[in-house]
Image (tube, helix red, strand yellow):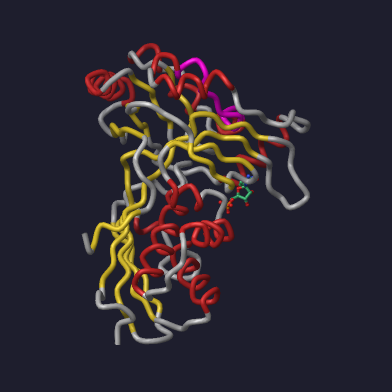
């Protein structure tokens, strides 16, 4: 029997851009203290949870890159379902389906989005009555970016990036994303960063960025975007530096690496500029390049079925 009246629950979860990413020194737990400003953007994965008999977990992924993901316990969505069962001492079954659009190993927290979606969808399917802060705490056990996937919007992340506080913003920000055919391993980029900057200062939140966000003008925002992992990512993948350097040539206000890369986000003034920059990037990077116009902020994980 289904646990709720509804046998199919679908959640939509956004990918993220880091407007700033300050990285502190490596801690004993293998993580780095971060100060980051996340923005959720209009590129989503959809996670569907369907009723299955007790003890059963199944997972299927669709999408262009689906073949790169395991449909088993290696998938963060599967682990999210397991964690939820353990936390609530239940043994309910679930069939998960992930419609994958956020790039894999792209620096946009796509795996974390799937975990966030699985937590939300399974908690509703199984009628577990968890409050949002409990879901965020469970999410943090799965990955540093999962709490932000649940929260969305624009938010300041501290700790491992898992302590998330919404930021005051105005208006909509437009971006053109340039994806990369090959992903980058997040631990590898952090390790390279430790080699390049063995004793970085404790990261801080740039006050000018917060004022620019409040004012809601992309041009004011542009000078304050940065990513401490960019140097490490570019040393592993020198082509990324060339892509980032295209910003003035293609008419973007600036370009910033998403998380540990390799996705590059080009900031533009408005929707019309996004079309122009998209075309200019296509001319520079070639017809094979994977590009996409997005905007932010958008909400975090939410249910789209039942509507
Ligand atoms: O939390 P998550 O599993 O997504 O992190 C992946 C890897 O990224 C960690 O194993 C660690 O190597 C690195 N990381 C880090 N400091 C953070 C977040 C992630 O070093 N604050």
Q: Residue at x 37, y 53 (%)?
A: 301
Measuring from the top left, give residue 178's x and y in whole percent.
37, 32
Q: Quadrant of residue 25?
A: top right
- Residues 32 and 238: in front is 32
Q: Is residue 281 magenta?
A: no
Pick the quarter of the image with the N terminus.
bottom left
Measuring from the top left, give residue 2's x and y in whole percent.
30, 82
Q: Is residue 228 above or below residue 84?
A: above
- Residues 264 and 200: in front is 200
Measuring from the top left, give residue 261's x and y in whole percent.
50, 37
Q: Residue at x 39, y 81 (%)?
A: 93
Q: Residue at x 66, y 28 (%)?
A: 204
Q: Is residue 274 above or below residue 153?
A: above
- Residues 95 and 159: in front is 159
Left or right of 141, for residue 26:
right
Left or right of 168, for residue 289:
left
Say how many tags the image has.
0
Left or right of 76, for residue 298:
left
Measuring from the top left, give residue 210's x and y in whole percent.
52, 24
Q: Residue at x 38, y 24 (%)?
A: 266
Pick the quarter of the image with the C terminus.
bottom left
Q: Is residue 129 above or below residue 192?
A: below
**Part of the protein shown in magenta:** 221-231
């Amino acid at each position: 029997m289904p646990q709720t009246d509804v046998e199919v629950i679908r959640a939509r979860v956004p990918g993220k851009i880091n407007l700033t990413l300050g990285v502190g020194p490596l801690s004993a737990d293998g993580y780095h203290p971060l100060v980051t400003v996340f923005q959720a953007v209009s590129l989503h994965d959809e996670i569907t949870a369907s009723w299955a008999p007790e003890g059963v977990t199944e997972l299927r992924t669709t999408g262009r890159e689906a073949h790169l993901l395991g449909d088993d316990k290696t998938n963060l969505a599967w682990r999210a379902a397991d964690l939820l069962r353990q936390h609530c001492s239940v043994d309910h079954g679930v069939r998960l389906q992930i419609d994958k659009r956020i790039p894999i190993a792209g620096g946009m927290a796509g795996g974390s989005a799937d975990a966030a979606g699985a937590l939300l969808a399974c908690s509703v399917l199984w009628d577990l009555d968890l409050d949002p802060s409990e879901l965020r705490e469970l999410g943090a056990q799965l990955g540093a970016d999962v709490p932000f996937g649940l929260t969305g919007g624009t938010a300041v992340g501290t700790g491992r990036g898992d302590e998330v506080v919404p930021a005051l913003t105005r208006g909509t920000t437009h971006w053109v994303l340039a994806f990369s055919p090959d992903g980058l391993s997040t631990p590898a980029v952090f390790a390279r960063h430790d080699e390049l900057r063995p004793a970085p200062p404790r990261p801080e939140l740039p006050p000018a960025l917060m004022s620019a966000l409040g004012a809601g003008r992309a041009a004011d925002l542009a000078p304050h975007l940065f990513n401490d992992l960019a140097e490490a990512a570019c040393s592993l993948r020198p082509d990324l530096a060339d892509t980032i350097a295209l910003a003035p040539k293609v008419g973007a206000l600036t370009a910033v690496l998403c998380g540990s890369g390799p996705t590059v986000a080009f900031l533009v003034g408005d929707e019309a500029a996004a079309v122009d920059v998209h075309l200019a990037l296509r001319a520079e990077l070639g017809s094979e390049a994977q590009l996409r116009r997005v905007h932010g902020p958008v909400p975090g994980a939410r249910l789209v079925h039942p509507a």
